[in-house]
Amino acid sequence: MRAVVQRVQSAAVRVAGREISAIGPGFLVLLGVGADDDQADVDYMVRKISGLRIFYDQDERMRLSLHEVSGAVLVVPQFTLYGDARKGNRPSFAGAAPPEIGRTLYEEVMRKLEGAGLEVGGGRFREAMEVELINDGPVTILLDSEKRF
């Protein structure tokens, strides 16, 4: 499982021009599910996202998590995080999970983040979405449950 985590002042998702979810300060998470991902990957991602300490404290050091700043998280499914363009210019998405597995694990990540006490919004699986955000920093962190980066 892969994620691009961006610290935001706000973020929103639209489908067909209609806003379906929005948050204030927190994280925008673009989440890709890999073909071999399972519950362990879900648990890893939830633990990392909810525990990331990338908000500033009173000493202007990144030491605070979403919980400590009452932040929200907007999780947007993005299978293209598994795009492989090493051979040619047209990416292969063979590493991405099939849609039914991807949807199940994506929704499980959202449920578990909510279960961890976070305010969670989401995108819409297998839909064309418009994502709007105001970066805070910008601060962007890449996560991979296989710890490739």
Image (cartoon, rainbow, N blue to C red):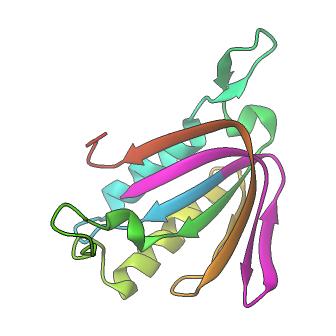
Q: Quadrant of the C terminus?
A: top left
Q: Specify the farthest residue to the top.
A: 59
User: Which residue is painted at 25% across and 72% down in the image?
Assistant: 35
Q: Quadrant of the N terminus?
A: bottom left
Numbered range of the magenta stretch: 1-27
- 127 on left or right of 47: right
Q: Residue furthest bottom?
A: 16
Percent position (x, y) of residue 49?
A: 54, 45
- State how many labels appear: 0
Q: Residue at x 25, y 43 (%)?
A: 148
Residue farthest left in this picture: 87
Camera-side residue of 62 and 117: 62
Place residue 137 in its image quadrant.
top right
Q: Residue at x 82, y 13 (%)?
A: 58
Is 129 one of the magenta-colored residues? no
83 vs 23, nearest the viewer: 83
Give the x, y percent position of residue 34. 30, 67
Judge from the rendering whether residue 25 lies leftward or rightward of residue 51; answer left or right. right
Q: Nearer the viewer, residue 7 or 119?
A: 7
Indicate the position of residue 55 as horizontal and vertical percent values.
Answer: 70, 29
Task: Let me know if residue 4 is in the magenta part.
Answer: yes
Q: Compared to 149, does 98 lie above or below?
A: below
Which residue is nearer to you in this view: 14 or 116? 14
Q: Residue at x 66, y 33 (%)?
A: 65
